[in-house]
Amino acid sequence: MNRYAMPVHQKSIEKDFESHALISEIPRLVATIKAIKTKKELSKIKDELNHILFELWFSINFSSGINLRDREKLYPLFKEVGRLFGVGSYPFAYRGVRLSDWDANALSETYTDLEIGDIIYNPKEPRIVDHLEGLAYGLRSWTPILSGAESWASYRKRHKDKLIFQISNPEVVLDANEYLKDFKGISPFDWNEIILFIKNPKIVSIEKTEDDLFLVKIKDN
């Protein structure tokens, strides 16, 4: 079954870039790290791991790296890295984004009368639900710091609706703060970045928190 039958929107991948050739190295790295028991042992391949993760993951910020169609292929690698370094426990995780280009103002056009502080519970509009669930789904960067998500939502000011996803008690796959302790070299992650794999997102509520910002609470069923 094509995993993109749910819920990543097909329009989000129509013009997606091609993944970096280093994607072919993922299975080998996973097999190698599965045999490693401690962080100290991992040091033997840390430089190679950093390089591959930088090219595949960090470079997504520059519209290169690993594309949406292939992104879940990194899950077993992140899971093994998280096993070795450990992950923190957080009450909330946040992700700041803009709506996709193909319907960049869906929220503001649908909820024209929404005032600051107004909340819509369990929205039903397909235009909204399909778009938001597609943005929340999958292997993505989140943060436990709300202000960090707000910065990402405001990054590169454009005429697109901006929103903050919020999820309670997230199941963290990889915790960048644990990975970056005593770290030297080019980092493939940001501080306070946590990686989640949201498999079945459902929109709980949409709240307008500022004139141009929406808080979207989700759960992962």
Image: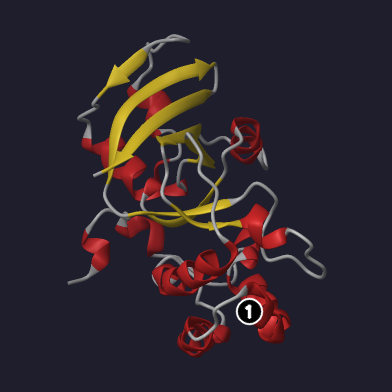
Q: Nearer the viewer, residue 102 or 216?
A: 216
Residue 147: % across, % down: 65, 31
Q: Which image quadrant for residue 44?
A: bottom right
Q: Quadrant of the N terminus?
A: bottom left
Circle 1 — which element?
Answer: helix
**Relative to 144, 114 lies left or right:** left
Relative vertical location of residue 219 with respect to residue 2 in this rendering, above or below = above
Colouring used for the render: secondary structure
Amino acid beneath label 1:
Ile
Q: Nearer the viewer, residue 183 or 135?
A: 183
Q: Quadrant of the C terminus?
A: top left
x 32%, y 44%: residue: 133
x 82%, y 70%: residue: 185
x 42%, y 73%: residue: 76
Residue occupied by mark 1: 52
Q: Nearer the viewer, residue 84 or 190?
A: 84
Q: Nearer the viewer, residue 52 or 209?
A: 52
Q: Residue furthest left?
A: 1
Residue 204: % across, % down: 29, 29
Residue 162: % across, % down: 52, 33
Relative vertical location of residue 117 with respect to residue 162 in this rendering, above or below = above
Residue 156: % across, % down: 67, 42
x 27%, y 63%: residue: 4
**Relative to 14, 87 lies left or right:** right
Answer few, some or many: residues within 10 Å of disc 1's Cα (few below 14, many 20 plus, some between 14 and 19): many
Relative vertical location of residue 183 with respect to residue 137 in this rendering, above or below = below
Q: Which image quadrant for residue 36?
A: bottom right
**Relative to 7, 49 lies left or right:** right
